[in-house]
Each structure stands twice: as structure tokens, then as C-alpha cells.
Image (tube, coloured by chain):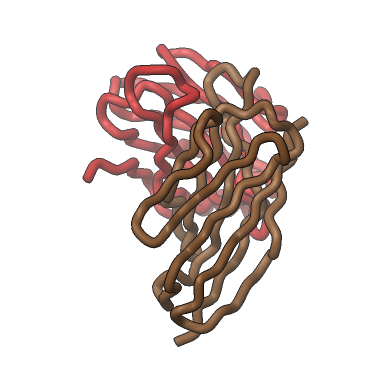
């Protein structure tokens, strides 16, 4: 059974710092991995989707990498801003799920201090 | 930009009552999902829906739950007899049209907060 873990659970950084959020998964047989942002009491905003055949994806200041063999993904945020403060979730889509249900980690709560 | 919408944003109900949560997926999407998030816990998959039928469901999705796409645009989740432990944020999601589901990015709605008293 797939388990997704995110470390650390919370992270506080000063504005302008580059940072890395970590995601690990136990079953490497994934179709893809998706990173989301969740603001308090709000829905999930998709940030990046990495297919199993890809090593990384970039969108603006965000870069996500995927290493299936080690069961890890990272989300790199460059030049962090206070507006980046949110909880970041990663979710894996497994083989075997007929229509692609996502298995989520618990998230990393990021706080960027001005 | 197209988005998934959900109504109501907050639903309060008494234990044992039926509730219907509504979602309008992104137009032309073919894959539809319900997830839930109990306060402080992970987002959990409930059910996926494709081609007018359930594709997959989790252990959580028991006989008290049902889904329907009544009119080609709305996608609903019904809980027949709510329990205290059904209190959670319920998210609807939809996946892009065409291609394999494995390439589909899932787009989530803002959620419905269900409170069962």
C-alpha cells in the first residue's frame, strides 16, 4: 500500500531564501506525482505535475524533481516571498488505480517571514 | 481560467440527515473525483467516476455514500445518513479531457466544509 510522507511538517524561512520541500513514497510504481498548494481553509491549487518518465518540471520560481528509484520528490522554491506561505502537499498516482486516485502526504506548512 | 466550483461552501447538518454536496467540474473534463480531508489529517480519496459510472472507490466510500452526474455538468456526492465522523472538508476534482488518466493533472474545487452535529 502506497504511503506518502513529507518532511519537515513545518518550515519557517526569511524572505528571499531558497528552500526545498521533501516528499517520499514507499511504492515506486507511480504514474505521476503532483504538487499542490493549500491556503488555510481553502482548496488545493495544482502547482506541478511530474510524469513517471520525467525527472523534473519547472514553473516560474518552482522546480519539482522526481527520483522514482529512491522514492523521492523535491519541490524547490527560489527567492521565497511572504505570499508563498501556505501548506504544500505532494500526491502520488499509482499504477493499478483504474482511474487515477491520488495518495497524499500530510503536507509541509511553510511560513516565509518578511 | 476554467475552474472547479463547489456548493455550498459550508453545510451544517444533524446526525442522521442526508446531505448532497454539489460540484461543477471543468467543462470537457472526463474524470471526476471526490476526496475528503478531516481537520488536521491527510486528504483522502473517496471515489472516481468516468463514463457515467464509478471507476474506483476507497474503503471509506461505503453504502452511505453515492455519486451522480445528473445532467452532464453537475457532479454530486450524497451521504444518506450522516455521522459525526463524516465532518470534514470535501473536495471535488476533475481531470483533463482525452489521453490516459496517468497524464491527467487533477484540478480541485474550493471544497465544502461539512459539519455534522
Decide: is B41 above or below B22.
below
The foreground one among A62 and A37 is: A62
The quarter of the rendered structure image containing the N terminus of chain B is: top left
The foreground one among B78 and B48 is: B48
Q: Residue at x 52, y 25 (%)?
A: B48
Q: Which tint was used for chain A?
A: brown
The foreground one among A81 and B84 is: A81
Q: Residue at x 33, y 43 (%)?
A: B5
Residue furthest to the left: B1
The x and y percentages for residue A62 are: 43, 57
Colour red maps to chain: B
The x and y percentages for residue B83 are: 68, 43
Q: Residue A92 sits in which quadrant?
A: top right
Q: Residue at x 55, y 68 (%)?
A: A19
Residue B116 visible (yes or no): yes
A45 left or right of A108 in image: left
Query: How many tags in the picture?
Result: 0
Residue furthest to the bottom: A114
The x and y percentages for residue A76 are: 52, 60
B103 left or right of B45 in image: left
The x and y percentages for residue A89 are: 57, 53
Residue A46 visible (yes or no): no
The quarter of the rendered structure image containing the C terminus of chain B is: bottom right
Amino acid at each position: 500500500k502506497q504511503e506518502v510522507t513529507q518532511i519537515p511538517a513545518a518550515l519557517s524561512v526569511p524572505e528571499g531564501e531558497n528552500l526545498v520541500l521533501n516528499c517520499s513514497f514507499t511504492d515506486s510504481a507511480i504514474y505521476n506525482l503532483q504538487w499542490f498548494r493549500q491556503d488555510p481553509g481553502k482548496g488545493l491549487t495544482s502547482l506541478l505535475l511530474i510524469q513517471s518518465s520525467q525527472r523534473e518540471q519547472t514553473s516560474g520560481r518552482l522546480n519539482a524533481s522526481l527520483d522514482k528509484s529512491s522514492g523521492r520528490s523535491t519541490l524547490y522554491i527560489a527567492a521565497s516571498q511572504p505570499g508563498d506561505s501556505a501548506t504544500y502537499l505532494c500526491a502520488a498516482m499509482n499504477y493499478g488505480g483504474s482511474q487515477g486516485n491520488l495518495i497524499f502526504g500530510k503536507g509541509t506548512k511553510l511560513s516565509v517571514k518578511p | 481560467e476554467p475552474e472547479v466550483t463547489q456548493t455550498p461552501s459550508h453545510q451544517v447538518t444533524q446526525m442522521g440527515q442526508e446531505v448532497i454536496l454539489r460540484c461543477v467540474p471543468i467543462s470537457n473534463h472526463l474524470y471526476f473525483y471526490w476526496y475528503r480531508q478531516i481537520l488536521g489529517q491527510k486528504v483522502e480519496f473517496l471515489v472516481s467516476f468516468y463514463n457515467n459510472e464509478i471507476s474506483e472507490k476507497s474503503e471509506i466510500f461505503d453504502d452511505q455514500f453515492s455519486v451522480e452526474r445528473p445532467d452532464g455538468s453537475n457532479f454530486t456526492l450524497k451521504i444518506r445518513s450522516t455521522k459525526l465522523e463524516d465532518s470534514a472538508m470535501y473536495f471535488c476534482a476533475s481531470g483533463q479531457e482525452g489521453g490516459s488518466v496517468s497524464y491527467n493533472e487533477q484540478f480541485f474545487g474550493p471544497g465544502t466544509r461539512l459539519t455534522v452535529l
